[in-house]
Image (cartoon, grey):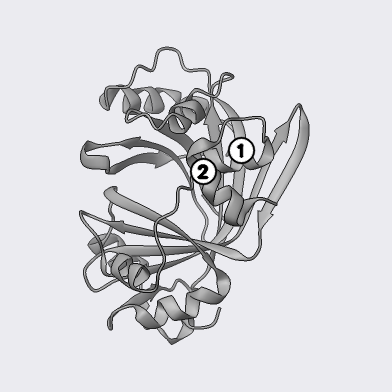
Amino acid sequence: MTGFAALPAVALAELQETAALQTRVDRKYVLPLDALPGLLAALPDGTRRLVIDGRDAFGYESVYFDTPALDAFRLAAGRRRRRYKVRTRTYCDTGGCWLEVKTRGPRGTTVKERREHDPAAPAEVGDGLGFVLDALRGRGLPAGDLDLRPTLTTRYRRRTLLLPDGARTTVDTGLEWHGAQDGAPRTATVPAHAVVETKSVAGASAADRALWALGHRPARISKYATGLVVLDPTLAGRPWRRTLRRTLTP
């Protein structure tokens, strides 16, 4: 994609060492694809792109799990402080699969805990249920005997940038949602926009300031919850209504 190749490379080991950011402040933006060159030009000198085996764009597939009553979705829709997501994430190009639990920490931070998962069974929590329950209880969330089932699959291609201030920025394109409504398979795509996410330890990163200077503001979007609403408009989607109306309605 235009502009990315001009940035110097950073290896995965250095990125993980300097910016693992398992507890972080996240901000998300939805940008037209033609706005990306302007963003890249506005980033500070020293910004680098993740390159692995000569590639700088990587396929991701995430399978999200929820209860039959969609408890995780409803907690997000109600903007509850104590909310969670459970998913498997498969790195389609580089290999590997992880089971991840995301919760909210102090002052709006995102806390992610994960463990390796069987890449042959990304749509099953399997023996990782104990890990999920422990992670939720450790964050003070009532877990009980959680009945988790796969509810949504997302696919996209991601580029990752490391900024001089140690923050990360990811740029996701080609977003696809795969799920069902009333038992019938449904798919939606976002072909003309990128989801840009900034991740920093605290406060605004240099990427946030560049985005603001270009007139972009954070958007309410959750790849899981927003995707469910796109595929099933009968679900309440108030927190994401503006984003849906402007860019993401198929």
Report the quarter where the N terminus lies.
Answer: bottom right
Q: Say the numbered circle drawn on residue 180.
A: none
For residue 229, which numbered disc appears in the image? 1
Q: Residue furthest top?
A: 144
- Which residue type carries mark 1? Val
Residue at 68% x, 54% y is 189
Residue 156 screen position, x and y as percent: 58, 57
Residue 83 as seen in the image, left or right of residue 223: left
Say above or below: 134 vs 100.
Answer: above
Q: Which numbered circle lies on residue 240?
A: 2
In this figure, what is the number of numbered marks? 2
Left of 27 or right of it: where is 172? Answer: right
SS label for mark 1: helix
Q: Residue furthest bottom?
A: 6
The secondary element bearing badge 2 is classed as helix
Residue at x 42% of width, y 76% of height: 39
The answer to whether the residue labelled 1 contacts the one labelled 2, judged by CB atoms less than 8 Å apart, is yes
Q: Nearer the viewer, mark 1 or mark 2?
A: 2
